[in-house]
Image: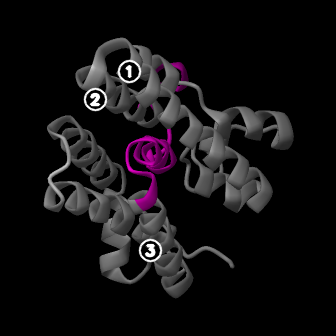
Amino acid sequence: MLGYALGNFSPAYLIARKVGRFDIREKGSGNAGATNVIRTLGWRYGLLVFLLDALKGATAAGAGYWLGGETGLAAAAIGVVLGHDFPVVLNFRGGKGIAATTGILLSLLPLPTLAGILVFVLVVLGTRMVSLGSLVFVFGMAVYVIVTQQPLMWVVVVVVAALFALLRHHENIRRILAGVENRISL
């Protein structure tokens, strides 16, 4: 419950309201996340949203572990991604959970996650598709935790987060396969 409540905090929504005086869910892709903030308000604000969302994920994972060990970590981590993706305070219209997942992963596996972020950057630079980079990142991390036999609760968290990413990116996947996915300006 704590993780879900924390996930409802939406920096994208708040920054767009304050800086742009609009509802981020009514502009660009309609998602309350860092990529849409980049598209509508610029890199500076998008990076700020990404960092705040990642901090939200790391905070939930840390608090969950502190309150309930591995099981608490898993519940809080999955909860924060659910809260970010489907926030009750925004009528269940949130972001796609990649930044929050990144924060969780950084708290669990810092070096492999940094390597995953590098792969994300290379995919985005090569394709200009943030959605493709995001999917490669989360699924690469899911494969990593399975192959390296990380603790079961960590595997559960990362695989569930990857499945949420798949669910939230289903339209992006269709556009990628059709060759018409939105590309970000570098």
Foreground residue among 128 and 177: 128
Q: Are marks 2 and 1 in contact (CB under 8 Å)?
A: yes
Q: Secondary structure at mark 2?
A: helix
Q: Secondary structure at mark 3?
A: helix
Q: Relative to 163, does residue 173 appear above or below in the rendering?
A: below
Q: Position of residue 35 (x, y in %)?
A: 59, 57
Q: Quarter-wise, where is residue 2 in the image?
A: top left
Residue at mark 1: 64
Whether residue 42 can be seen here: no
Residue at mark 2: 74
Q: Residues within 10 Å of mark 3 (few under 14, many from 20)?
A: some
Foreground residue among 138 and 93: 138
**Residue 34 colored magenta?**
no
- Per the model, the C-alpha gap separating discs 3 and 2 is 25 Å
Query: Split into 4 quadrants, where in the image is the C terminus?
Result: bottom right
Query: Split into 4 quadrants, where in the image is the N terminus?
Result: top left
Residue at mark 3: 119
Report whether 114 appears left or right of 46.
left
Q: Position of residue 26 (x, y in %)?
A: 63, 44
The magenta-colored residue range is 86-111
**Residue 96 colored magenta?**
yes
Q: Relative to 100, does residue 123 appear above or below in the rendering?
A: below
Labels 2 and 1: the sequence-earlier one: 1
- Residue at point 36%, 31% (across, down): 77
